[in-house]
């Protein structure tokens, strides 16, 4: 019997469990740990609340979770309740599928001013992550600056621009919906330090900006490269740039009934966040491209702003004793191997890139490595206590483990208390989740 512990119940974790089932069938026991009492990681707290079809992938993870040989062990924090070393004693292999939950820092003066948020915090706030539920961003000013040209920047800009009615069918949490209702924003500036050809935004997400009821995207035609140059882009990127071209062609008359401008400011690198105690503006330097890199031209200007959300990427949380690649912001690893018996997968392995589906081959890849190491004797097979050994340890420590059937009670309670037009109203505190699971 193979005993595998997976830390993290997001896509990378569940695809790894699925791969382990495919590899060993009934001869494997998998425990998937999560520090929250609820599963699915970024599917629950990262994917935008108005993208419910993407969240539908959790049904696939549920099928894995309900199998006989896979358990969800929620509400257990590795490093606080149980150490990695203890898990390594119990299981043949420990796989870190911990994602990249922390914001990369801008490294700019003023980034700690009030109402400057990283996207992990901001997205976590509107998605009801217990760690960020109390963020309380101030939406009372007229301009927000969203830094970055990736899909998260688009998510944030879109969420800031939508009306309450446009959240019908979404599982945005009530505290965020109520706060967004009070928003006075009329200008959302998306800052890109490079140009339209270098965006990391996908066509579908860009296209959504044209269907917003009170907001309209704006691109300065002067920022667009000559149209012939689009031919050198790969097809997806060409589609994205076609959207930008269509935004540049929107006539002013079309904006009359759209009080919110979503303005793409390209070749614009933030240099400082300005303000006394709260953010009052962003100092920006115009850039030009040299060998694909953004190089400052020396020309600067200030965008007055009362809210800044930096959507510039994420990093993994280091774990004491586990080799970490500081520059890359993820665990130091060789194709998923960190140390004998210790592996990583998904964003914890390769950094925050790709789609949800990218984690599937990742999960299968890491299981292949574990199988190789088991076959060559690098790791022992079934020699630790495995899941039964963990249960003993959890009982000794009095851990309040939330299992999958407990999560289903939480889910049921969230569905029962949902607004009429929403699939669920998430609990945003761990205590309330535990209570709903009947474990208080
Ligand atoms: P991302 O795609 O890596 O984009 C980060 C952006 O931040 C880039 O435009 C980057 O510019 C910019 N940036 C980085 N450091 C900066 C700095 N110091 N100053 C100014 N700009 C800076 O990251 P993300 O948007 O966080 O997305 C993470 C992953 O999740 C991606 O794979 C994304 O596609 C995925 N995702 C997908 C969806 C969806 O499919 N609907 C939704 C959300 C996220 P440079 O290019 O110049 O470095």
Image (cartoon, grey):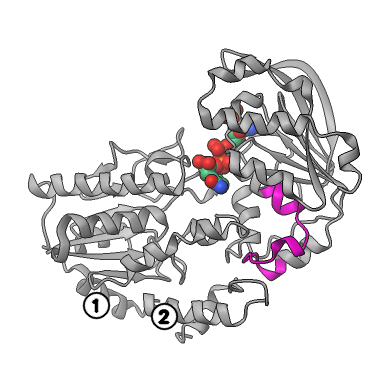
Residue 45: give x, y in percent of width and height: 55, 60
Residue at the (70%, 49%) spot, across then down: 158
Q: Is residue 292 visible?
A: yes
Estimate how packed mark 2 is, as few (under 14), some (14 to 19) or many (20 or more) residues with alpha carbons within 10 Å: many
Whether the magenta-drawn stretch holds residue 165 is answered as yes
Determine whether the beta carbon of the residue marked 2 sits less than 8 angstroms from the nearest atom of ligand 1: no
Residues in magenta, as a range: 156-175
Residue at the (34%, 49%) spot, across then down: 360
Residue at the (14%, 46%) spot, across then down: 373
- Which of pointers 1 and 2 lies earlier in the amino acid sequence? 1
Viewer-closest of 329 and 243: 243
Residue 91: give x, y in percent of width and height: 20, 61
User: Marks 2 and 1: in contact by CB < 8 Å?
Assistant: no
Residue at the (68%, 65%) spot, across then down: 134
Task: Answer with the quarter of the image where residue 413 lies.
Answer: bottom right
Q: Is residue 344 left or right of residue 167?
A: left
Mark closer to the observer (1, 2): 2
Q: Which residue has dot 2 on it?
A: 406
Determine whether the beta carbon of the residue marked 1 sits less than 8 angstroms from the nearest atom of ligand 1: no
Q: Which residue has dot 1 on it?
A: 392
Where 302 sits versus 345, above or below?
above
Is label 2 in a helix, a strand or a loop?
A: helix
Residue 254: give x, y in percent of width and height: 86, 41
Is label 1 in a helix, a strand or a loop?
A: helix
Whether the magenta-drawn stretch holds residue 179 is answered as no
Task: Answer with the quarter of the image where residue 421 lies.
Answer: bottom right
């Amino acid at each position: 019997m193979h005993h595998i512990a997976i830390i993290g119940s997001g896509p990378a974790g569940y695809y790894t469990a699925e791969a382990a089932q495919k590899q060993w069938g009934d001869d494997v026991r998998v425990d998937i740990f999560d520090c929250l009492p609820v599963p699915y990681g970024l599917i629950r707290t990262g994917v935008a609340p108005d993208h419910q079809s993407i969240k539908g992938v959790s049904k696939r993870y549920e099928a894995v979770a309900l199998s006989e040989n896979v358990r969800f062990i929620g509400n257990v924090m590795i490093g606080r309740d149980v150490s990695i070393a203890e898990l390594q004693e119990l299981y043949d292999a420990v796989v870190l599928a911990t994602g990249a939950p922390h914001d990369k820092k801008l490294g700019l003066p003023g980034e700690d001013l009030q109402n400057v948020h990283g996207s992990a915090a901001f997205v976590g706030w509107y998605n009801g992550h217990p760690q960020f539920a109390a963020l309380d961003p101030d939406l009372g000013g007229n301009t927000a600056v969203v830094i970055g040209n990736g899909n998260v920047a688009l998510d944030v800009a879109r969420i800031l621009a939508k009306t309450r009615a446009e959240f019908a069918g979404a599982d945005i949490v009530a505290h965020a919906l109520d706060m967004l209702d009070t928003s006075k924003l009329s200008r959302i500036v998306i800052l890109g330090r490079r140009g339209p050809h270098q965006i990391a935004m996908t066509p579908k997400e860009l296209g959504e900006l044209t269907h917003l009821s009170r907001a309209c995207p704006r691109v300065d035609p002067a920022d667009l490269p000559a149209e012939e140059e689009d031919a050198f882009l790969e097809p997806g990127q060409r589609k994205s740039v076609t959207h930008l071209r269509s935004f540049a062609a929107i006539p002013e008359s079309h904006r009359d009934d759209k009080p919110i401008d979503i303005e793409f400011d390209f070749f614009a690198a933030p240099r400082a966040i300005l303000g006394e105690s709260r953010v009052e503006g962003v100092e920006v330097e115009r850039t030009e491209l040299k060998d694909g890199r953004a190089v400052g031209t020396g020309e600067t200007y200030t965008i007055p702003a009362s809210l800044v959300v930096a959507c510039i990427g994420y990093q993994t949380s280091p774990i004491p004793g586990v080799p970490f690649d500081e520059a890359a912001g993820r665990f130091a690893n060789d194709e998923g191997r960190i140390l004998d018996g210790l592996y990583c997968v998904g964003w914890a392995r390769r950094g925050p890139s790709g789609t949800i589906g990218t984690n599937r081959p990742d999960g299968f890849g890491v299981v292949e490595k574990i199988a190789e190491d088991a076959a060559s004797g690098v790791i022992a097979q079934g020699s630790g206590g495995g899941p039964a050994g963990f249960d003993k340890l959890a009982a000794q420590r009095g851990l309040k483990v939330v299992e999958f059937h407990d999560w289903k009670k939480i889910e049921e309670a969230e569905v029962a208390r949902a607004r009429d037009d929403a699939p669920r109203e998430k609990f945003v505190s761990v205590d309330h989740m535990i209570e709903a699971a009947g474990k208080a």
